[in-house]
Amino acid sequence: MANPLRFIAGLLVLAGLAAPAAAAWPERPVRLTVAFAPGSSTDVLTRALAQRLSERLGQPFVVENRPGAGGNIATAAVLRGPADGYNYLVHSTAFAVNPALFKERAGYDAERDFVAVGLLAITPNVLFVHPSVPATNLAELLALARTRRMEYGSSGTGTTPHLGAEQLFRALAGVDILHVAFGPAQAVTAVVANQAPIGSTSLPPALQLIRSGAVRGIAMAAPERHPALPDLPTVAEQGFPGFAASTWFAIMAPARTPGEIVEAFNAALMQSLASPEMATMLNAQAFSAQPMPSAETSAFIRAEAARWAEVVRTSGATAD
């Protein structure tokens, strides 16, 4: 009979030879390419997270902003890069939406070309107006938009603030309204400057300006009122039951990235999101952490892609 200790030792040697690349990951700086501009919700969240990851893993997590084309410029840049575990995309819900909205011009297949590392956070969208607009609620705003040509600024083409507003204004309320894609932070400042009378963004960039009165909140696009603005009614409360439109944020890797590195990154990500520092930041910015395993994140994104593709179809939204 073979010596059992020698047999076990042999197994340990083989296990060592087959040790995944993740055992030493990361060995150098990791690049996080953000699909939107500095100051956007995606950017703010990514920079806070990058700091936590750098502290936890001992390597710099470098944030690079590549805004434009609803996030497609950043997506293409990451897809052209190496699938070596050091090249990642940080995107919003638009990542799942763009293939339906842009069709072949999106330049990628969300399921074929990328693998999800993990979901970061979610936040509701909010509708607001310049204080000069004579509307204090959704019914008054819709009535006003039926009497004059109006426009609204959104976080960008293909974002849920864009598509949610298209669904609400056109498909549900039957109001013809012009969409202008500003970008997340720019959409809020455009309404403050009265360059656009209406804004539709995720909650974080608009929160403090709504609180200060620089813009007037009209409706929260969430299933229930948000604790950050408890006096602001939801769209559902104002005549459109069941309506909700939120923005989520996730990290994706090129599809050929080694699976063991993806899992190692996911573990570090979930630990970082659970840190007290991240919890404080998330609460202050009206984010809700949504940590989940890689496979679960992939399933979530597939479901979201199907949901918003139907919104694109029924609302007639285009990549303008």
Image (cartoon, helix red, strand yellow):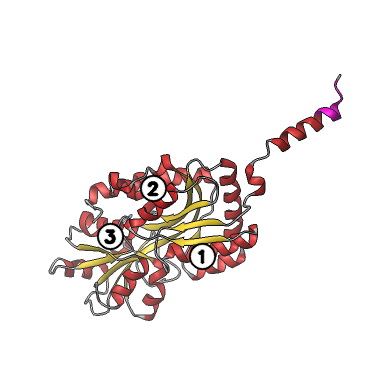
Q: Quadrant of the N terminus?
A: top right
Reading the image, the residue beneath label 2 is 304
Percent position of residue 180, x then y = 25, 64
- Tell me which residue sits at (33%, 50%) in the image: 98
Percent position of residue 18, x then y = 68, 36
Q: Secondary structure at mark 2?
A: helix
Q: Secondary structure at mark 3?
A: helix
Reading the image, the residue beneath label 3 is 165
Camera sees residue 28: yes
Q: Amino acid at mark 2?
A: Glu
Q: Quadrant of residue 235?
A: bottom left
Among the two numbered marks 3 and 1 on one chain, the one whose residue lies closer to the N terminus: 1
Q: Is residue 316 left or right of residue 213?
A: left
Local crowd at mark 2 within 10 Å, few (<14), some, or many (≥20)? some
Among the two numbered marks 2 and 3 on one chain, the one whose residue lies closer to the N terminus: 3
Among the two numbered marks 1 and 2 on one chain, the one whose residue lies closer to the N terminus: 1
Give the Cα distance between marks 1 and 2. Answer: 25 Å
Q: Amino acid at mark 3?
A: Ala
Specify start and end residues of the magenta stretch as a single range. 2-7
